[in-house]
Image (cartoon, rainbow, N blue to C red):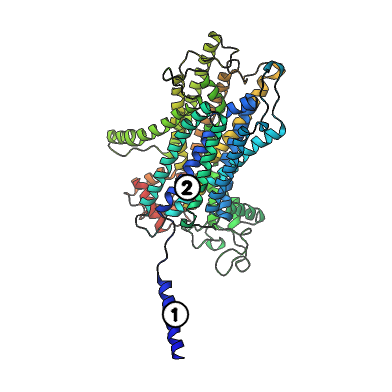
Amino acid sequence: MDKELQLSSVVDSHDEMVSQQPQKRKGGLITMPFIIANEALARMASLGLLPNMILYFMGSYRLHLGKATQILLLSSAASNFTPVVGAFIADSYLGRFLGVGLGSAVSFLGMTLLWLTAMIPAARPPPCSQPTQGCKSATNGQMAMLLSAFGLMSIGNGGLSCSLAFGADQVNRKDNPNNHRVLEIFFSWYYAFTTISVILALTVIVYIQDHLGWKIGFGVPAALMFLSTLFFFLASPLYVKITKRTSLFTGFAQVTVAAYKNRKLSLPPKDSVEFYHHNNSSDLDLVVPTDRLRFLNKACVIRDHEQEIAPDGTAINPWRLCTVDQVEELKAIVRVIPLWSTGIMMSLNIGGSFGLLQAKSLDRHITSHFEVPAGSLSVIMVGAIFVWIVLYDRVLIPLASKIRGKPVRISAKRRMGIGLFLSFIHLVIAATFESIRRKKAISEGFLNDTHGVLKMSALWLAPQLCLGGIAEAFNGIGQNEFYYTEFPRSMSSVATSLGGLGMAAGNLVSSFVFSTIEHVTSKDGKDGWITDNINKGRFDKYYWVIAGVSALNLVYYLVCSWAYGPTVDQLSKVITEENGSEVEDSTELKNVNPLFDDKVSDSSKEKELTEFKISEENGSKKEELTKD
């Protein structure tokens, strides 16, 4: 008996020692190469397919320019919209690991299917040996195979969009004193390799397609996508896998439903804090909702504490009763929608198809033996973006600060407006240049020659490409910063997805404008503005139409900007100047809207917010924003 007790004690002590041994933590910088490789290879594969795709449609499938452009615009819209759906599914059900993994696999299937359309002769129309006698068009089955490839790639992109957030999960450790530095390293390398992959896609892969044909040109991206998927799954045992999260989109739906169910309910007095449902674990520490969009406030009104509130303080039925936080988060997204809609114009364009055909009509020789691929000229725009970012951040802003003797900074909202203005100028230059190019093509006798190359350098496209890149740098970065600073931390995922939603909306509007102009200008059998022969078409007039819409959008932006009022940074600066930079000790903080994580609403409406209180964390964060 004593031996059994001794043996038992030894076993227990051994088990205790084993349980006390520290387990190897997952995640960390060791996962960074796999995640970055996954994103860089996937980006290189997907972007490498796009520049020359219009040539594949018009050549191998004999689609007209109008139909081919519509397919590309709708495909781009789908690829920009699926990340929102992907983020919702990953955050609510699958987790980000499965989201990225399945997205990679589905993208690989789509690229493989596209490669098979080039490999299998029966997957596309037969060669056209005698164009004068008519050529066979693609059958429904052939078009279904082609469109299925693009559909799979769009769906896969929805999962791949979770890559950045999944990577941040691996290195984001609050107990690490150097956590901010580790995150900075990850984001820096992530964007650096993404940029390199974009440049390689627009140069190397485009060159392969031009000189080695579609079979190898589509096979290389498919192989890269396979490697991307393989690298991601190889490190599966190393990843931190967070599978369950709460979704803001579900919260938005709950607020909408609850507000509708309680629509006949009378709102209690503003100082009746006990009638509003609060989230005790909230960082925002809201007391009562704001007076904006008051009909939504009914979603967080408590009618019967015993029947609606659980013992732990949560709502028994979240589709009947929501928290003040949830209500104000929905208000935040509604308030920013008008300004967000002004960014749609940045993606309203004539379609990348025309730019490629335009470049092919120009002299692209650097030397007598080397000709730049037409699809690679967009590298000029990419280069302009990054050169301008460096000049703006490292030269212009420090120089302006030195001249004025105090820090100079252009607010995010103002940068959005500057980007829209530069986009308008870019469209005016593009319309003017196309008018000049068309006149020169006619004077050189290329009116009916779709393959004629003008005695005009393709570098004349550089000014409009550079200006378009600078406009994108101002507006795109300004939008991201604006959403991130105006929204609470809990809405960071929404902030990052709004830019993609704007591009998706822009592609849809572009498709609508394109089809409308094509239909209106070709009535009664007339030659429309949009033809397969760009020398016969009037794409210069198309550019002028878009430039006019851009001018109206600029006026619309000014109205929305005025209606939005001061941003967080602007009100933070005012409060700092009035209170000697001691923000947390100022009584003015009671007028700050705690929804926006130390963010403030219009100064003209600050009285509405006096019922709110703010946590010490929010106060300290305001100091950081003020210093920045």
Please name the residue that numbered disc 2 is placed on: 164
Residue located 55% across and 48% down the image? 331
Q: Of residues 319 and 270, which is closer to you in this image?
A: 319
Return the x and y of residue 587 as percentages of the image width and height. 39, 54
- Which is more N-terminal, label 2 or label 1? 1
Is 529 left, or right, of 475 in this rendering?
right
Residue located 51% across and 57% down the image? 242
Note whether residue 291 is visible: no
Amino acid residing under circle 2: Leu
Quarter of the image for residue 385 reads top left
Residue located 27% across and 35% down the image? 402
Q: Which mark is residue 515?
A: none
Gap in Å between the C-alphas at discs 1 and 2?
44 Å
Is 40 left, or right, of 72 in this rendering?
left
Return the x and y of residue 107 as percentages of the image width and height. 57, 43
Note whether residue 480 is visible: yes
Please name the residue that numbered disc 1 is placed on: 12
Give the position of the C terminus as an image quadrant.
top left
Return the x and y of residue 129 as percentages of the image width and height. 66, 19
Q: Of residues 480 and 47, which is closer to you in this image?
A: 47
